[in-house]
């Protein structure tokens, strides 16, 4: 494991976020005394927002991080989940399930990614979840995209699922101001709860889009939401 001084960020730059990955969780009820937790994040690249990283390292603990000392928590307090699937190409939505956790216990999760030389990203955000407790009902998708304006990437965050808390379809598409589709980022059924999707400011053909205004349109069970994104040169 690389020391914090030798880490380099993959994917989202550290100037925009505290870590290289945004990690989200959804608890799924299991047996009476156990529960599963599903983790969601967007794959970073091996070099910025492009390429494919080599490995993920995921750790958890029943103890929160003290202040900002993530290194001590990672090295001395947390437990490794073990082997998880290798990263997909940058921008892919990743999902991983940890089974048979103690229902009712609060778990803290952090993930990093590394390249083939074991140079690793910064720590992700700390995702917190009480195992076995379902997400609250979703009243609105509340989509936001950041940074905005952007030059090389935009991260969209929104609440997925139905108003009853059940999974629901979600489609996120980028259009130019003439109504032409630029790229479809997402079209699938998602569990209720917070989701994140990365747009690397590219079209369906893999070309970087021209500077200008673009409409990000989210279609979800709670309605249709539009956010205008400014892409800089």
Image: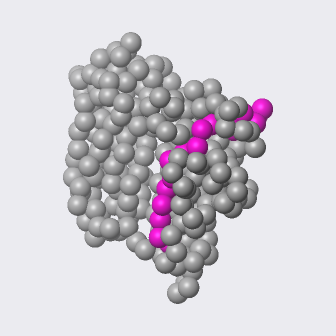
> How many marks do you count on the picture?
0
Q: Residue at 34% of width from left, 21% of height from top?
A: 231
Q: Quadrant of residue 164?
A: bottom left
**Frontmost residue, 181 versus 174:** 174
> Which residues are the magenta region?
114-131
Q: Quadrant of residue 36?
A: bottom right
Q: Residue at 37% of width from left, 40% of height from top?
A: 156
Q: Is residue 73 visible?
A: yes
Examine the residues drawn in magenta and state their main secondary structure.
loop
* Percent position of residue 74, x then y: 65, 52
Describe residue 102's horizontal placement relative to residue 201 as left or right.
Answer: right
Q: Residue at 50% of width from left, 24% of height from top?
A: 206
* Percent position of residue 106, x then y: 50, 70
Question: Of all residues shown, which one is farthest toward the top?
Answer: 233
* Percent position of residue 81, x then y: 68, 60
Q: Above or below — where is 225 with respect to 205?
A: below
**Frontmost residue, 126 versus 149:** 126
The verdict on residue 125 being magenta is: yes
Q: Quadrant of the N terminus?
A: top right
**Frontmost residue, 48 versus 67:** 67
Describe residue 65's horizontal placement relative to residue 202 as left or right.
Answer: right
Q: Quadrant of the C terminus?
A: top left
Q: Residue at 48% of width from left, 61% of height from top?
A: 128
Q: Above or below — where is 193 with respect to 123?
A: below
Picture colour scheme: one colour
* Percent position of residue 151, x then y: 41, 20
Q: Is residue 90 visible?
A: no
**Frontmost residue, 160 versus 119:** 119
The verdict on residue 216 being magenta is: no
């Amino acid at each position: 494991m690389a020391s914090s001084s030798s880490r380099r960020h993959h994917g989202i730059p550290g100037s925009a976020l505290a870590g290289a990955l945004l990690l989200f969780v959804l608890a799924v009820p299991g047996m009476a005394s156990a529960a599963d937790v599903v983790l969601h994040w967007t794959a970073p690249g091996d070099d910025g927002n492009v390429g494919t990283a080599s490995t993920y390292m995921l750790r958890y603990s029943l103890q929160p991080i003290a202040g900002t000392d993530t290194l001590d928590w990672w090295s001395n307090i947390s437990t490794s989940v073990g082997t998880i699937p290798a990263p997909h190409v940058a921008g892919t939505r990743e999902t991983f399930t940890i089974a048979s956790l103690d229902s009712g216990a609060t778990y803290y999760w952090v993930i990093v990614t590394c390249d083939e030389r074991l140079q690793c990203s910064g720590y992700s955000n700390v995702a917190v979840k009480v195992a076995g407790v379902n997400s609250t009902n979703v009243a609105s998708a509340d989509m936001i995209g950041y940074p905005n304006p952007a030059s090389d990437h935009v991260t969209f965050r929104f609440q997925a699922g139905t108003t009853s808390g059940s999974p629901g379809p979600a489609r996120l598409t980028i259009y130019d101001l003439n109504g032409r589709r630029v790229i479809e980022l997402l079209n699938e059924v998602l569990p209720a709860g917070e989701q994140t999707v990365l747009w690397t400011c590219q079209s369906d053909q893999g070309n970087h889009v021209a500077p200008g205004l673009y409409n990000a349109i989210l279609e979800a069970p709670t309605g249709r939401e539009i956010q205008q994104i400014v892409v800089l040169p």
